[in-house]
């Protein structure tokens, strides 16, 4: 079901993109900027929406619905992650305590120098 909703979602997105690109904006003619559209008002005539505008609105509503459905599916998947067999933090900590500290490797301590400056025995002699 999720795959079907995802396919419909992608098809709706492609349809909206193509319909928006097909529509002509208000004042999009080249003559409108030079006074050719003087009979129009500043924002264009606000009549009833065109057929393409109505179809775009319906497709946008469908895109919203499919987005919401995909969000619900994602939430269901996220809540079922706990059932995936991953142990909880308490289980991991109790298993580590049961093994004890002997199971952990012990690091050897490095010899510490008296300072940051190497001693004379550490510096190689220069060949002359």
Image: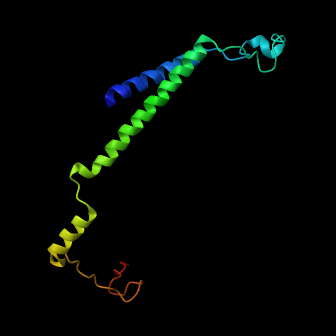
Q: Residue 13: x and y, percent?
A: 47, 24
Name the foreground residue: 90 vs 20. Answer: 90
Name the foreground residue: 113 vs 121. Answer: 113
Work out which quarter of the rendered image holds the N terminus and state it. top left
Q: Is residue 5 above or below residue 77?
A: above
Name the foreground residue: 124 vs 28. Answer: 28
Q: Is residue 92 left or right of residue 57?
A: left
Residue 49 visible in the snapshot: yes
Q: Number of marks in the image? A: 0
Q: Residue 128: x and y, percent?
A: 38, 78
Q: Residue 10: x and y, percent?
A: 42, 25
Q: Is residue 56 left or right of residue 103?
A: right
Q: Is residue 107 left or right of residue 59?
A: left
Residue 104 visible in the snapshot: no
Q: Residue at x 27, y 64 (%)?
A: 89
Q: Residue at x 20, y 74 (%)?
A: 97
Q: Residue at x 41, y 83 (%)?
A: 116
Name the foreground residue: 101 vs 12. Answer: 12
Q: Residue at x 81, y 20 (%)?
A: 42
Q: How is the image coloured?
A: rainbow
Residue 44, located in which quarter of the rendered image?
Answer: top right
């Amino acid at each position: 079901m999720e795959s079907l909703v995802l396919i419909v979602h992608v098809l709706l997105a492609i349809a909206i993109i193509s319909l928006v690109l097909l529509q002509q904006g208000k004042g999009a003619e080249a003559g409108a900027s030079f006074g050719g559209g003087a009979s129009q008002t500043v924002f264009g005539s606000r009549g009833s929406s065109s057929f393409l505008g109505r179809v775009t609105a319906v497709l946008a509503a469908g895109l919203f619905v499919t987005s919401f459905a995909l969000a619900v599916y994602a939430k269901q998947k996220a809540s079922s992650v706990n059932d995936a067999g991953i142990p909880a933090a308490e289980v991991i900590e109790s298993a580590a305590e049961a093994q004890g500290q002997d199971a952990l490797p012990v690091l050897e301590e490095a010899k510490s120098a008296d300072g940051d400056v190497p001693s004379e025995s550490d510096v190689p002699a220069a060949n002359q």
